Image (cartoon, helix red, strand yellow):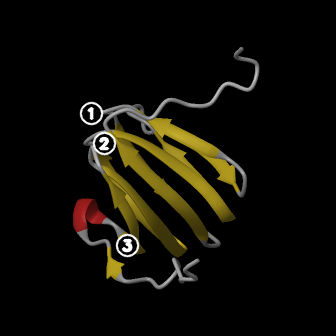
C-alpha cells in the first residue's frame, strides 16, 4: 500500500488564457492514459481548447461550469462528470472554487450499469 496526496497544486495552468487554475499529475498508464487533479480557484477558468484525446472531467468538490464547442455554460457540482471527445473544444470555470479529476486516454468508455 502507498498513501499519497493528489491535491498538491503542482503546476499552474497558463495556456489557453487560463486563470487561477493548477494541475497535479497523479498517474499515467500504458496507452497514454493520464490522471490529473485540477484545482480552479474562485473566479478561475481553464480557457477553451480542444481535447487531445477522450477526456473525463469528474468534479469531486465545489461547483462551477463547463462549456462545449457552443460556449454555453452548464452548471456542474461535486458528483457530476463530463466527457469530451478528441478535438472537442471545451472550457471550465467557477466563481466559488472547484476541484476535479481529469482522466485522459485514447479510449475511455463510460460504464453502463444496466449492461449485461
Q: Are marks 2 and 1 in contact (CB under 8 Å)?
A: yes
In this rendering, is residue 94 above or below 69?
Answer: below
Residue density around tag 3, few if under 14, some if 14–19, many if 20 or more, within 10 Å: some
Count the labels in the image.
Answer: 3
The residue positioned farthest toward the top in the image shown: 116
* Residue at the spot of label 1: 87
> Disc 3 on helix, strand or loop?
strand
Nearer the camera: disc 3 or disc 1: 1
Choose top left, top right, bottom left or bottom right for residue 9: bottom left
Return the x and y of residue 102 as percentages of the image width and height.
Answer: 46, 55
Direction from residue 51 to residue 103 in the image, left or right: right
In this rendering, is residue 3 above or below 116?
Answer: below
Q: CA distance from mark 2 to mark 1?
A: 5 Å
Sequence-earlier tag: 2 or 1? 2
Return the x and y of residue 61 as percentages of the image width and height.
Answer: 68, 67
> Disc 2 on helix, strand or loop?
loop
In this rendering, is residue 16 above or below 32?
Answer: below
Direction from residue 70 to residue 6 in the image, left or right: right
Residue at image point 51% right, 50% down: 57
Where, quadrant-wise, is the C terminus in this rendering?
A: top right
Q: Are marks 3 and 1 in contact (CB under 8 Å)?
A: no
The residue positioned farthest toward the right in the image shown: 114
Q: Which mark is residue 19?
A: 3
Where, quadrant-wise, is the N terminus in this rendering?
A: bottom right
Residue density around tag 1, few if under 14, some if 14–19, many if 20 or more, within 10 Å: few
Q: Nearer the viewer, residue 1 or 114?
A: 1
Residue at image point 47% right, 85% down: 8
* Residue at the spot of label 2: 51
Nearer the camera: disc 2 or disc 3: 2
Amino acid at each position: 500500500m502507498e498513501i499519497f496526496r493528489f491535491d498538491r497544486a503542482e503546476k499552474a495552468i497558463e495556456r489557453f488564457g487560463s486563470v487561477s487554475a493548477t494541475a497535479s499529475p497523479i498517474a499515467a498508464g500504458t496507452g497514454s492514459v493520464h490522471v490529473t487533479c485540477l484545482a480552479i480557484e474562485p473566479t478561475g477558468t481553464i480557457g477553451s481548447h480542444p481535447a487531445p484525446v477522450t477526456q473525463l472531467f469528474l468534479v469531486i468538490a465545489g461547483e462551477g461550469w463547463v462549456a462545449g464547442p457552443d460556449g454555453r455554460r452548464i452548471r456542474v457540482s461535486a458528483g457530476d462528470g463530463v466527457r469530451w471527445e478528441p478535438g472537442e473544444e471545451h472550457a471550465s470555470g467557477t466563481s466559488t472554487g472547484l476541484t476535479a479529476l481529469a482522466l485522459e486516454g485514447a479510449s475511455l468508455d463510460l460504464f453502463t450499469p444496466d449492461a449485461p
